[in-house]
Amino acid sequence: MNPEPTISVAVPLRDEAATLEELRRRLRTVLDAQPGGPHELVFVDDGSTDETAALLAEAVHSDPRLVAVTLSRNFGHQTALAAALDHTTGDVVVVMDGDLQDPPEAIPRFLERYHAGFDVVYAERVARKEGLLLRLAYFLFYRLIARLATIRLPLDAGDFALLSRRVVDEIARAPERHRYLRGLRTWVGFRQTGIPVERGARVAGRSKYGLAELLGLAGDGIFAFSTVPLRAATLCGAVTVAGSLLFGAYSLWARFFMDRSPAGFTALILTILFMGGVQLLFLGVIGEYLGRVYEEVKARPQYVVSRVARTGEDAPPN
């Protein structure tokens, strides 16, 4: 293991003009204090509609460590993370968000664990600053996916992490379109550990992850690393068949030995509606898996790069 590794910091950005300069300043301060080098910053503009792209274009001419990757449109946070990883060259890569909720000052602590022999060092989020309802949703989601996943996923661990070069290379080999980086880095294996990192509040602006985006990310994580929803359909079907057989046996017993037949038009209608709803629900679950298979079969590229800019260079992608 390289005692003084080169460090790449991979950051996806979308409409982060208000925080970009502060983010660069704090990252420069951290990287300047690290031995070795040259270190680099890889910023990916994921279809921003504010001044983020212009600020990156200006910054790249004055910062030789900065690599600015501009995507042709908004492809989504996890895809932008993949693009950032693909353009890094360091011995270790630190993945973080651009809203400064992930504090750059935690990077030296990541490096300490890396030097101790760990290939993945992830942040265990503590003291989150979001609202109570959102904190509860995160709490429940991490524990739900940990129970459902076929691999052991760490609790309360977001994208903020340090990855060794061999972990980054293995993740790059995964061609899937609906990416869940937190699961992929666990699936890769090697030695992994977490460190507690206080989750800060946004410095400026507002979160780009609304309810739909959060639910989509949760779905990607569950459907990418678990087949439990499909097995639940089988279990529900088995329970329904068993219940039907028991009710049928009871009906025959009541008819021949009790001289009466079970009645109840309302109960019959409710049963039909309930079973119809269950069938539609699990058709939707199957559709989620089938839709992901369809996306994979099309084999479209995960993202399209409009431009890659470095100091003294402003060129389209290879």
Image (cartoon, helix red, strand yellow):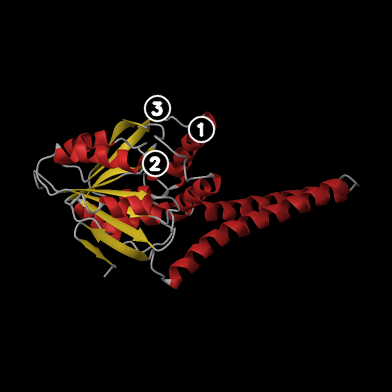
Mark 1 = which residue?
A: 136
Q: Residues within 10 Å of mark 1 (few under 14, many from 20)?
A: few
**3D distance between C-alphas at marks 3 and 2:** 24 Å
- Which residue corresponds to mark 3? 127
Q: Which amino acid lies under the numbered mark 1 shown in the image of this protein?
A: Leu
Measured in 3D between alpha carbons, the distance from the residue under mark 3 to the one under mark 1, in whole angstroms, is 12 Å
Q: Quadrant of residue 287?
A: bottom right
Where is residue 223 drawn, in percent x and y?
48, 54
- For the residues carrying marks 1 and 2, which lies nearer the camera in this image? 2
Left or right, 227 with respect to 263, comes to left
Tell me the crowding category of disc 3: few under 14, some 14 to 19, or many 20 or more residues within 10 angstroms, Cα based. Answer: few
Residue type for callout 3: Ala
Per the image, label 3 sits on a secondary structure element best described as loop
Residue 31: x %, y % from top left: 18, 41
Tell me, yes or no, if residue 12 can be seen here.
yes
Closer to the chain start, of discs 3 and 1, is 3
- Looking at the rendered structure, which numbered label has been put on residue 18? 2
| Residue at 47% over, 41% down | 207
Q: Nearer the viewer, residue 260 or 286?
A: 286
Looking at the rendered structure, the kind of residue marked 2 is Ala
Marks 1 and 2, the one that precedes in the sequence: 2
The correct choice, above or below, for 274 with respect to 307 in the image is above
